[in-house]
Amino acid sequence: MSRLAATLAARLAGGTRALTAFITAGDPGPEATVPALHALVRGGADIVELGVPFSDPEAEGPSIQRSSERALANGVTLASVLDMTREFRNGNDVTPVVLMGYLNSVMRMGYEAFACRAREAGVDGLIVVNLPPEEAAEAQASLARQDLDLIFLVAPTTSSERAARIAQRGSGFIYYVSLKGVTGARHLDTADVARNISALREVCSLPVQVGFGIRDAESARAVARVADGIVVGSMLVDVMGERRDDPASIPAALEKRVALLRDAIDTL
Amino acid sequence: MAGTNKTPYREPRRGGRFGPYGGRFVAETLMHALDQLTTLYEALKDDDDFRRELDHDLASYVGRPTPLYLAERLTAELGGAKIYLKREDLNHTGAHKINNTVGQALLAKRMGKPRIIAETGAGQHGVATATVAARIGLECRVYMGSEDIARQSANVYRMKMLGAQVVPVESGSKTLKDAMNDAMRDWVTNVDTTHYIIGSVAGPHPYPMMVRDFQAVIGREARSQCLGLEGRLPDLLVACIGGGSNAMGLFYPFVDDEGVDMVGVEAAGLGLGTEQHAAPLNAGTPGVLHGQHTYLMQDQDGQIMQTHSISAGLDYPGVGPEHAYWKDIGRARYTAVTDDEALEAFRLLNRTEGILPALESSHAVAWVAREAPKMATADIVIVNLSGRGDKDINTVAELDGIGL
């Protein structure tokens, strides 16, 4: 069983929820990323998600846009994100690492080369925001040969027939996009999410994690009631961005913020 | 193809593919809207009522057909091929862009969506979108890079007069590509109420096909006008290429006419040898941006590079996927001219024909100015004069050291 599947299965078996924590690799500086990943795990993250900065992040809100611009200004590349993952693995061989980004980064490296290098670096899965299943066959075949999960997204606009097809093609988990909007948007409607997730479960046997728009303990708890796990990103990226002049303070601040979320979803 | 046993050209294929290019690389949230748009468009494109309504708007509102004008003094000065100009600059709002926005506005109306959004570079597509929105009473928001807002202030003012909200885009390079990113972000947020009018043969399926079809009126007219005037088809078609909609509009109806050559002219900016240009077909590599697989200006890490062109409408790091395909199969040739050559052509056309071309279109004229003298006098060339240059006089005057 893959690290990702094992982690989610353990949470499901225990009747608790998974917590996935996202940060942008290389923001505010390349040296900040690995300590930040360890801090996320200490705070209680089950899975860490590392954003691969891209020049044109068309699905991101302002927080992740700016963090990507800062990371790119720091010279961060997909290759250096893989180096960061490898360095994280030196101190942690248990926590799944999922990369999240845009197709062009992976396509440019080459699907086969990326899959081999990602596997070797200790990556477990990949989320590509602009890669719907219709376009994914070639990338998915390369990833599958290295036992890497390609995680697909389902949105509030996805019909249930389509969701069924996506669930069949996906592996690892299904990332349910909680709202129509960009990352970090502020119009999350948890009643909507509950309704849509229960419809999604009819056609999907993979674990369902929900992200976009979870900003605090309250929204985390509301979403965790209906999902197998939650994904938080923009709020953690903000924590790092706000402390970019004092990077030494980042790990403790992240750990504290993640611990609050952990606590919120563990006490449903 | 005409007079042979070759299979007629039939792209795109399933999934909006032009060979390996095109496709639909977008966030899942948009897939439903794209499916919906594709289904509606497929149903309407051959529908008699829809065609009638569109043709009526093109005739009575846009002012079509536009003339195919024989540029006699330009032809004489260059001393080679006979040069015709397809006068898209004479359309309402001053460019070819409105051929597409009129069509997509009809689609928005049929979908019952009360709000439209657009991205714009030079502002011509923004103006053309704001215009149709005003005409049918839709709310309109136009995304425009702050860099472009500074160099195209007249068009910004026009859009505001038309009742559109112009949103300055401050991210990335602050030009057309970033405006498109922000338009996509708006669309993903307001997809239920909003139709996104993409201004070029670019973006996810069905846009490259749909915008091509709406712009193909250019080539259909030019083809029959040329047959009427000359009794034969032209030897060569020339058009500038940013995203590539005016070029595809002219070229597409000739695709099966084997004897008709086509040249697309990209912006070489300060030169293809510098990194200051916008010529992905000449100097780029395939990748994925804005929902499509196509040639891009990108670095080793797949980051999209900043582009440069004196013409805001060509300042885009990608290109429509059908052009990418035509480059690979050799159906059209793609070349580039520099800022300086375009400026020279801008002046040449003013001087010889009394026509003020857009800096975008000046790129096509510049290539012809360079190549026509090498051609036979019996050769017939059609240049797409895609827009008028009133919007560019400040830019040109500034280069001449004149404040207007």
Image (tube, coloured by chain):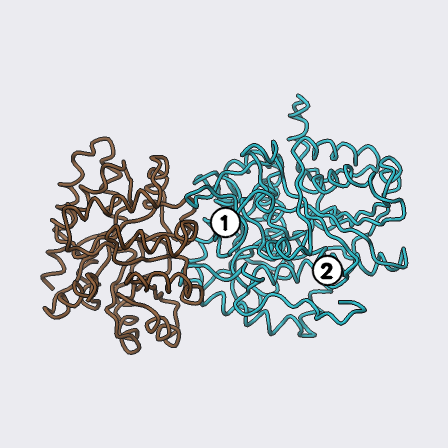
Chain colours: A brown, B cyan
The vertical placement of B187 against B240, above or below, is below
Tags 1 and 2 both on a single chain:
yes
Give neighbour class at mark 1: few <14, some 14-19, many 20+ (Cα, 10 Å): many
Question: Which one is nearer the viewer's eye here, B76 or A58?
Answer: B76
Quadrant (top left/top right/bottom left/bottom right) for the C terminus of chain B: top right
In the picture provided, is A88 more to the left or to the right than B11? left
* Relative image position of residue B150 (x, y in whole percent): 55, 34
On the question of residue A216 being in view, the answer is yes
| Position in image of residue B30 (x %, y %) | 44, 62
Task: Using the image, name the chain to which the residue with label 2 belongs.
Answer: B
Q: Residue at x 56, y 36 (%)?
A: B308
The amino acid beneath tag 2 is: Val
The image's mark for residue B201 is none
Residue kind at label 1, given as amino acid type = Met
Q: Indicate the position of residue A227 as horizontal and vertical percent values.
A: 22, 67
* Side (left or right) of B336 relative to B110: right
Q: Nearer the viewer, residue B314 or B232?
A: B232
Q: What SS does tag 1 mark?
A: helix
Element at label 2: helix
Query: Which chain is disc 1 placed on?
Result: B
Q: Nearer the viewer, residue B389 or A119?
A: A119
The tag on residue B217 is 2
Q: Residue at x 53, y 38 (%)?
A: B307
Residue at the top extreme of this rendering: B401
> Does residue A185 appear in this view?
no
Q: Position of residue A27 (x, y in %)?
A: 28, 39
Residue density around tag 2, few if under 14, some if 14–19, many if 20 or more, within 10 Å? many
Residue at which label 1 appears? B180
Q: CA distance from mark 1 to mark 2?
A: 25 Å
Please name whichever residue, A2 or B192, is drawn nearer the observer in this view of the structure: A2
